Amino acid sequence: MNYRFDNITVFGDGSWGTALSNLLADNGMEVCLWCYDKRAYESIQESRENRIYLKGIAVSDRVKPTLSLHKAFDFSNLLLFVIPSKFFRNILSDSSELIRSDHYIISAIKGIENETLKLPGEIIEDFLPAGYSKAPAFLSGPTFALEVAMRQPTTCVIASRDMEYSKSIQHTISNDYFRCYTNQDITGVQIGGAIKNIIALASGILDGLGLGTNSQAALITRGLAEIARLGERLGAEKTTFFGISGLGDLVLTATGKLSRNRTVGYELGRGRNLKDILSSRESVAEGISTTKSVYSLAKKLGIEMPICFEVYNILYKNKPIKDAIKSVMTRSLKDELHSY
């Protein structure tokens, strides 16, 4: 089947939703941007700039903001969700009657739901109308919003079980600064995008403590092992975690100064209180809530994830950071490849 899309609705007025809207407008599409935050909507309407979440970047005239879910769902049969994972279920619940059988869905959401331990794709399944048969797609990769908005070259992955749909989205999204690859491992792509935020929190903590590149390299390498361990248990392909949505996204988020999660971790490492850090931020650091989900999921499945567990202990049990590091470093000694 050949798919062709000339317009799209983007749900999410944050920095990434705004940047993706501009990207799609650059590709000649008409874009409806659904805004959750009235301030962002008014800012785009008045100044053609999202001064709340992506300050300094002009928003294309092809991007039409709206506060109406009805208008957003009616605008296009291609829906791209770019919202914090903790809000996803509520938004789908509020609009479930608006989802039509001819809608095609893309998720750029990176997280795992706290209460159900479901991935975004599983949450979507809870709200699809009877008879709906289209396979959703999942967008992920090393893509800081500001750099994409500045048209700096990068790559991403679009994953779906429907390869023809993936190829269509690949061609819809790609241009001379944004190159999209296809992948059929939807579980692996979603897991990599979610758990890398936890490792980025840990990376920021190490940096805040003033630790060096030895520590960072060790953390990223063993963090990737934890991501792959959980992903494989959930049915993902191990090779996915060594690609764009795995290692690529992990390196970006754990080392880049634009990383929200790394920044929160850095402030924790410097001794600031988590509540104070979050109260001073507009944007959401997905790793905070995902840490709780991954802790519960790994415990449920009997999987050891020592880095993720200690980040959980720091965030939710007030464990001293130096004690958490010691707990990871003094575990019983292992073989690198054949034990955990």
Image (cartoon, rainbow, N blue to C red):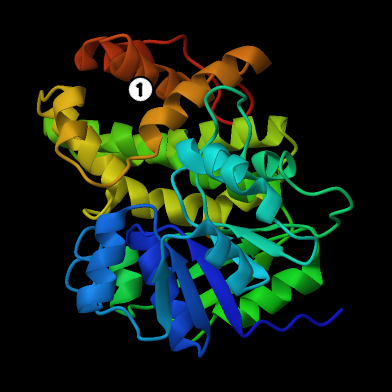
Using the image, determine if residue 255 lies above or below residue 273: below
Q: Where, quadrant-wise, is the N terminus in this rendering?
A: bottom right
Q: Nearer the viewer, residue 36 or 159?
A: 36
Q: Residue at x 33, y 40 (%)?
A: 285
* Relative to 332, 242 lies left or right: right
Residue 50, x across and y down, in percent? 25, 67
**Mark 1 residue element:** helix
- Report the number of discs: 1
Residue 320, x across and y down, in percent? 21, 11
Instruction: Tell me which corner region of the image, top left, top right, bottom left or bottom right, holds residue 81.
Output: bottom right
Using the image, determine if residue 133 lies above or below residue 113: below
Q: Nearer the viewer, residue 274 or 77?
A: 77
Instruction: Tell me which corner region of the image, top left, top right, bottom left or bottom right, holds residue 243.
Output: bottom right
Using the image, determine if residue 34 lies above or below residue 27: above
Residue 38, x across and y down, in percent? 30, 56
Q: Where, quadrant-wise, is the C terminus in this rendering?
A: top right
Circle 1 residue: 311
Q: Residue at x 57, y 74 (%)?
A: 8
